[in-house]
Image: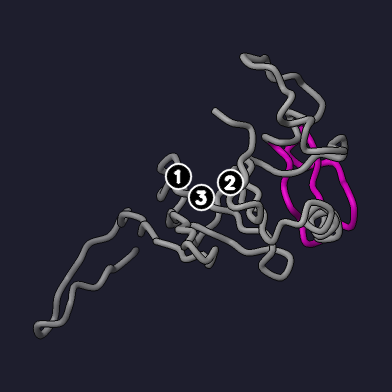
Amino acid sequence: MPIAAVIEEKVFCIHGGLSPLLEDLSQIENLRRPLQIPPRGMLIDFLWSDPDADVRGWAESDRGISYNFGADVLKSFLRKYKFDLLVRAHQVVEAGYELFADRQLVTLFSAPNYCGEFDNAGAIMVVESDLRCRFLIIAPRLKNGFHYSYDGRPKTPVFD
């Protein structure tokens, strides 16, 4: 699988996030595969780093691996490479997607009811030919609930 992808030279896609060690996109292109994932370094950052609204620059991650990066880091990266948007995954988000830094980053999570532990929705992002993005939401299944109907109205979920 690719480490990263670029859509129409404007949308940068990566599993986790950015790395303070990334100086040029050719570093991603030059990664030789197959490869082992090291405990530290640029590759682990691409898989594990997360955006954080409370961080300016870089900060150690609460996950105990890689970093959190601020909106300033994201905006600098996008400006440097002339991207409009960074798309990433790797974090459960309740609505299936979550926007960050003035809509310049979107976190997508496509697994509803992740691991049976969360009541999160999943989402799929569709990139239109004009590069506008829209989201298809995958609703979570009800847990500990049932459906009922009253007076011909559509079924309504009921939770404990």
Q: Tell me where residue 82 appears, x and y as whole percent.
A: 76, 57
Residue carrying label 2: 89
The single residue placed furthest to the bottom in the displayed view is: 151
Q: Which residue: 71% across, 44% down?
A: 17
Query: Which residue type carries mark 1?
Result: Tyr
Number of the front mark, 1 or 2: 2
**Tag 3 or tag 1, which sits nearer the N-term?**
3
| Sequence-earlier tag: 2 or 3 | 2
Residue lying furthest left: 152
Question: In the rendered structure, which segment of residues is drawn in magenta?
Answer: 48-69
Residue at the extreme right: 57
Q: Which residue is mark 1?
A: 114
Q: Is residue 133 left or right of residue 55?
A: left
Query: Of the numbered discs in the image, which one, if any, rests on residue 109?
Result: 3
Asked whether disc 2 touches disc 3, contact meaning CB atoms under 8 Å apart, the reply is yes
CA neighbours of label 2 inside 10 A, class few (<14), some (14 to 19), many (20+):
many
Q: Are marks 1 and 3 in contact (CB under 8 Å)?
A: yes
Residue 35, picture quadrant = top right
